[in-house]
Amino acid sequence: MTKAASQRKVNAALSAIKSINGNDQREGVNRLIYERVRLSLISILAVEDSVSFSELKSMLDTSDGNLAMHARKLEEAGLIRCKKITGQHQPRTEYTITASGRRSLEAYLNHMEKLVNSLK
């Protein structure tokens, strides 16, 4: 590979990385979901219709406090929805992904694909 071709790949990779910016949705990239637990949580919710707190805790192998903190951040950003269910047994907390959460996950996946392709 020539030095110029190598430099183009590096520049493309750096450009892809620089497009990650906070909660700015102009480019569709939301840095909030790049953290491992939050990315895992939103990925699970993209596949499942609804998942309980205890199921997520087990799937993610994390503590109550850690899961609650990450879920709250995603909920505050409007990426997931939390619903408290009271009924026959003990109360349950159910989570679902929002349309905005789905778009953010798609943007993340597109971004990562662009980054990987820039390195090939």
Image (tube, helix red, strand yellow):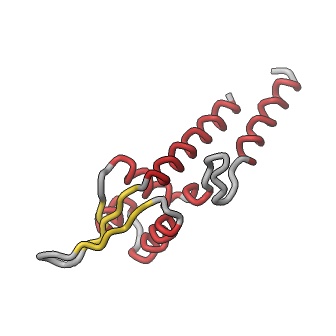
Depicted 64 relative to depicted 79: above or below: below
**On screen, residue 88 above or below 107:** below
4 sits to left or right of 30: right
Residue most toward the right?
3
Q: Nearer the viewer, residue 93 or 67?
A: 93
Q: Where 99 falls versus 88 (above or below)?
A: above
Question: Which image quarter: residue 59?
Answer: bottom left
The image quadrant of residue 56 is: bottom left
Q: What percent of the width, then of the height, locates residue 114? A: 64, 35
Does residue 89 sit above or below 104 in this rendering? below
- In the rendered image, the quadrant that contains the N terminus is top right
The residue at the point 63 percent across, 52 percent down is 25
Residue 32: horizontal and vertical position, in percent? Answer: 58, 60
The number of numbered badges drawn on the structure is 0
> Which image quadrant: the C terminus?
top right
Q: Hey, which residue is sitting farthest top in the picture?
A: 1
- Please state the horizontal and vertical placement of residue 81, each as a whole percent of the image: 39, 63
| Residue at the outermost left position | 88
Picture residue at 19% right of the left edge, 78% below the top: 90
Tell me which residue sits at (48%, 73%) in the image.
69
Horizontal side, residue 89 vs residue 84: left or right:
left
Q: Residue at x 70, y 32 (%)?
A: 118
